[in-house]
Image (cartoon, coloured by chain):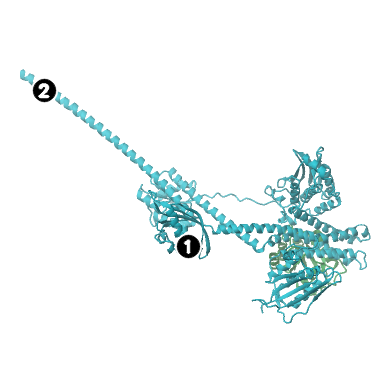
Amino acid sequence: MTTGTAGEGGFGRERSLQVLLVDDERDFLHLLAFEFCNVGFQVTAVDTGRAAVEAAQRQKFDVAITDLKMPDMDGIEIMVTLKQIDPSLPVIMATGYLSEATRISVGEYGAYGYILKPFSFEDILSLVDRAVGEAGQPGQRGARA
Amino acid sequence: MRAEGVATEELATAITELLESARRSRAERDAAIRERDAQAHAFAEAQEQLRREIVERERAYRELARQRSVLQQIIDTVPYSIFWKDRDSVYLGANQKKLDALGFASIEALVGVTDYDTGVRREEADFYRSIDRKVMEAGQPILNLEETQLRPDGPHVLLTSKVPLRDDAGAVTGILGIYVDITERKRMETELARAKEAAETAARARSDFLAAISHELRTPLTLILGPLEELLGDAGTGLSAGARVQLERIRRNARRLFGLVNDVLDFTKLEAGKMEVHWEPVDVVALVGEMVEDARSVAERKDISLGFAPEADIGPLPADRAKLEKIVLNLVGNALKFTPAGGSIDVAVRCAGDDAEISVSDTGPGIPSEKHRLIFERFQQLDSSFTRRYPGSGLGLAVVKELTELMGGRVGVESEQDRGSRFWVRLPRCSDRLVEAQEVGTGESVGPRDSAAQLERVSALFQVAGPQPAGDSGARRPGESERPVVLVAEDDGDMRAYMRDILAGRYDVVPVENGQQALEAVRSRLPAVVVADIMMPELDGLELVSSLKADPKLRRIQVVLVTAKASREEVVSGLDVGADDYLSKPFGPAELLARVRAAERQCRMFEELEVKRRELESALDNLRATQEELMQVGKMAAVGTLAAGMSHELNNPLATILMASQSLLRQLPANSPWRDAIEIIERQAARSGRLVKLLLDFSRRKPAATERIAIEDLMNRVVELAKSQIQGGNVSLQVERLERCLPPVEVSVQQMEVALLNVVKNGLDATASGGRVRLAARAPGRAGALGVEIQVSDTGSGIPPEVLPRIFDPFFTTKAVGQGTGLGLSLARRIVESHGGEIRVQSKVGSGTTMRVWLPSAVP
């Protein structure tokens, strides 16, 4: 697991938001963690579904981004488990391929949204900001970039 | 004294007579006794004769009953309609299937009528009668006549045979007809042929798709790897450590993509049979040794011990060096991929008879034996759930097999689950070929071994190492032996218990007291055999048999009737209503068991027949469904599955490359000398992503949600998108003034943008060296439908007439390899057609091309 913060250079957030990143593509995971740190997030990056669930049990997150296909758990399974631990947690699914059926079930199981790889960091950041904003704490609404 | 003398004499005579009489009477009595004995004997013999006759007749009856039952079952179950008529073509009888076909409720309704009364068309009845006549007059059968009959549910094709029936004297008395409905078979034949064609097209489409995607991706990947190597080499000595990490990350992923793409290309080439063998003598020990050395650093990093055991005197092998390298690389790569840390890989080269054998053994998870054959199949991994655990194209071993076979060799695997695997390749050491190789194969066509590239590929494989796959958890359920059910219907309690005890050792016995209970129990328990007493209260044995045999679902149940006395009448009436066998009281245990066993076998046979029939039906249904699916979506369905797996594999590394390059661009100062190179990387990664998306779109079947859009808006969006694609200043793209009041269209805007953009791009490509592309729209009157036509005209060189019909075919392209997918226009057509529209092309060599896209207007 990787955890990190970048004290400065954030987008002027009032407090550091906690993001949970789940992906078994190590390169991608580290890169995403690096980028989120750069804009002032507190990042927890894990590469298995089990580690994701453990992390969510340990602490509260503002948003989670998970790959749809993981070796140990299905992305939807991870999402459902995360939402059982914290029903208010917005979960974003990131995947290289999404079939029509999965697209529908992703919504039905309560994912905040999905994003198709490859995407730019701006894309994911704006999705995360929207998710966090809608999650409703007034203090965070201003955190949008 | 004299008188006394006389008296004595008389007395003597009398005594003598008396004695004689007594003797006679004794003799008579003896004779009578003998006579009586003889009579008794004769009587006994006659009795014995009678008994034998009874037994014999009983056996004959039983045999007759059995034959009758079998015959009836056959007539009822054969998939043929059977009927017989008299000399005037009046129906005398038919089986159930014939009655069903004619829609007659009972045989009584059919007997006595002719074809003119059965509801078939008059012409058909005429035809049947004429055939009847012909057969009867000639006294010769007509066999396998194919005829069409019009039924309420459509035309049926019947295959009919008619045979004359004769009496003992040989005179023709009527006709026997048998036909089978081959409508379905005919349809299946056609459908099978079509399905086969569809499957072949699908396989071709899969290959084409892979080739297209791989070709296309090579260009951007080369453009990504080029500047990368430069940056990471001497040119980038001033890079910060952070930037270097990012660049290395990009390189790792780009190489992984490259490996994937190369695998796929190799494979599609193999599949298309485009690969040639360049024979040359190869020192196989040296070659394998070098490759093992290449892989050593990777193995060490993974903490795997890598051993190499060559046999010294193997000599030169006739082979294609490049292909042999690929074989070894793929085998070693495969072992590296699946062997966990701490494990070992052993590579060996040895003589195996006339062959040279290269083998790679690992301590990986092993392969269950049922999968041994499959692992050399193409796309095996791509289709499996292990893809994420062991990412890769899944083509490596398929390539090994194809290449080996191309060189006349064989491949194999020995493996046990959890025990590791040993893959081997055997190539013939045939010296003739070696001479040939020495003469022909001077090695001119084979470049020096690019060990750097090899290492890259092994390194790429190194990255994908993962944990062991979980073993199959196919726990077998404890087998529960299903015993056949036998129902015993008998009103006498002791008799019931007696029969139950006899049968309980072998069967699940359901004892009931009367026919009514039996009927209820039969429906719930579905026994194989019913043993029923004829004399029972409520519902007697005969009524029970009639009910069972009248129900098609219960007909197969075998009924053994038990008769109280050897009453012929009872037996005959029992067999008449359809009982399958009978048993006379008293009977012994062995006899009961034997009867029930025979009946049970019979029932099982019918059941098996039924299962087979159902299997066949469901197989046909499946085939039909599969085939419909194939026909419906054509080859795109096959591509769709593949595209899903491929795009996942491709998008993951692409995501890293794209984001890492963007990240770098943010970090680098605006005047950094490396910006240009990284911008190229970013642009090419984005392009690769778009390409994957385009191919995926192409393979998608479902139309997206539609919205209403004004045609002007749609065209402006397309032009906006297309403008960014214009290269060079000599090309102009303009929208002409549009007709007023064009109706809006209802389309998936995203899809229609792609479609129109492809049409416009086609025009732009045609005018790349200078020219004009114009867009116009009008609302032409078309019969029955309102719509709008968008015209895209270019001033390019035009399309030759022989090419014109093919431009909408997938993968057809006139551009150089790597320049176009050949998917653009076919995608455009597919999208337009899925919107109920039409796309047409007009072109003349020398004076440009006009594409016309007609779309139906939105319903007001």
Three-letter code, disc 1: Glu
Q: Secondary structure at mark 1?
A: helix
Q: Secondary structure at mark 2?
A: helix
Q: Which mark is residue B11?
A: 2
What subunit carries mark 1?
B
Quadrant of the rendered image containing residue B393 = bottom right
Q: Nearer the viewer, residue B524 or B556?
A: B556
Q: Is residue B447 above or below residue B212?
A: above
Quadrant where the image shows the N terminus of chain B: top left
Q: Give the image location of residue A26, x and y in percent.
A: 80, 59
Q: Nearer the viewer, residue B620 or B515?
A: B620
Q: Marks 1 and 2, Cα distance to the nearest angstrom? A: 112 Å
What subunit carries mark 2?
B
Q: Give the image location of residue B417, x and y in percent.
A: 70, 47
Q: Is residue B284 above or below residue A136?
A: above
> In the visual, does B276 lie left or right of B198?
right
Q: Give the image location of residue B572, x and y in percent.
A: 37, 50
The colour of chain A is green
> In the visual, does B760 lie left or right of B17?
right
Is residue B592 visible to us here? yes
Quadrant where the image shows the C terminus of chain B: bottom right
Q: Nearer the viewer, residue B796 or B637?
A: B796
Q: Which mark is residue B124?
A: 1
Q: Earlier in the sequence, mark 1 or mark 2?
A: 2
Chain letter corresponding to the colour cyan: B
